[in-house]
Image (cartoon, rainbow, N blue to C red):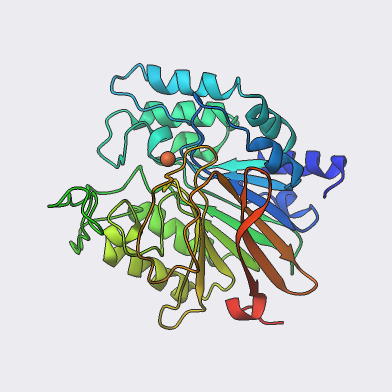
Amino acid sequence: MFKRRTVTGLMAALSLAPTSAAAQAVPPLTRIALGSCAKQTMPQPIWDAVLAWRPELFIFMGDNVYGDFKSADATGLRQAYEGAGQIAGYERLRNTVPHLAIWDDHDYGANDGGANFAHKAVSKQLFLDFWKAPQTDSRRARAGIYDSRVIGPPGMRVQIILLDVRWFRSPLRITDQRGAAGKQRYLPDPDPSKTMLGAVQWAWLAAELRKPAELRLIVSSTQVLAEGHGWERWGNFPLERQKLFDTIRDSGAKGVVFFSGDRHIGALYREQPTGLHPLYEMTSSGLNMVYWNAREPGPNRLGALYAGANFGAVDIDWRERKLTLALRDQDGGVQRTVTIAFDALGLAG
Ligand SMILES: [Fe+2]
């Protein structure tokens, strides 16, 4: 646990430009918590467990509020942020724990929304205001809210990459059998013109992966590795999913781990793409939105789904050179976990 002085230091560093050297002038991260899907009109008792775990950093992975709206005044989204601001645990975390945020569809403003959503500029402004991005923040002056930080000293740097899988995303291919197992809403679309990130964000990501860092936490609100279901996932655009692996491989980046939300279930995944170190993914969803009946095959899943309220906890042991991913429940108890040696992520000793 950082001393109070240090928490304040990281808080201040996170509000600086991503390239700022100040973000690296803090102790190495060892405890990072993550979560998604927090409906502001329902109780959110999980914050006590999150705060009790004493994360040095919390990452909001989207559906941070539920504020779908259809007219330019964005009333639904404004009210959603006001509601979240009145939840004691949520506010306590925002006031005392350094944090980063990316959106998913319901704080973007449209269920399963993509590039075509007409009011995304309004959503972006409300997002950046709620998350207190400074007026000088580069996200205010460009398309999308993708973002990154490198935190910690050389040799113990954690890069956090927050992908925007909404602003630029091409239309999805609608299922021919709504609700059917494996094709609930969407079918894989191999159209090479379809994009998940858009050209500018792809180029940005390739450059980010070349910045010096040891561990790289890539946050995508929608699942990257998961197979076997027809909800939103990178597999909806299989060529883009492969491009993500290719981009990581071509950059030479090691230590990459994925984190996602969206699904109202928690789960761990592992995949071994050709020419890359094994990729792990922790899906943590939701903080209070849960899909108790979830059932799905998981060819690359590690163990069973967890279908209760959960948050993700990442313990980094720099001395033993390993990290532990854990899904923790509303009481802080560990429900699913995997420990990964740095060596297994391609990091040289
Ligand atoms: Fe959600």
Residue drawn at x 77%, y 74% is 320
* Left or right of 298 on screen, residue 14: right
User: Looking at the image, can residue 331 be seen?
Assistant: yes
Question: Quadrant location of the C terminus?
Answer: bottom right
Q: Residue at x 32, y 28 (%)?
A: 119
Q: Is residue 124 left or right of residue 317?
A: left
**Residue 140 percent location from the top left of the image:** 48, 34
- Residue 348 drawn above or below residue 115: below
Ligand 1 found in image quarter = top left
Toward which corner of the image does residue 132 lie, by quadrant? top right
What residue is drawn where x is 54% and y is 43%? 309
x then y, percent, for residue 80? 47, 23
Q: Measuring from the top left, give residue 98's x and y in whole percent.
A: 70, 41
- In the displayed structure, 299 sits above or below 14; it is below
Quadrant in which residue 315 is drawn: bottom right
Which of these two is toward me, 24 or 40? 40
Q: Residue 211: horizontal and vertical position, in percent?
A: 59, 64
The vertical placement of 237 against 342, above or below, is above
In depth, the one of 44 and 211 nearer the eye is: 44
Foreground residue among 195 and 328: 328
Please indicate whether residue 345 sits to the left or right of residue 267 in the image.
right
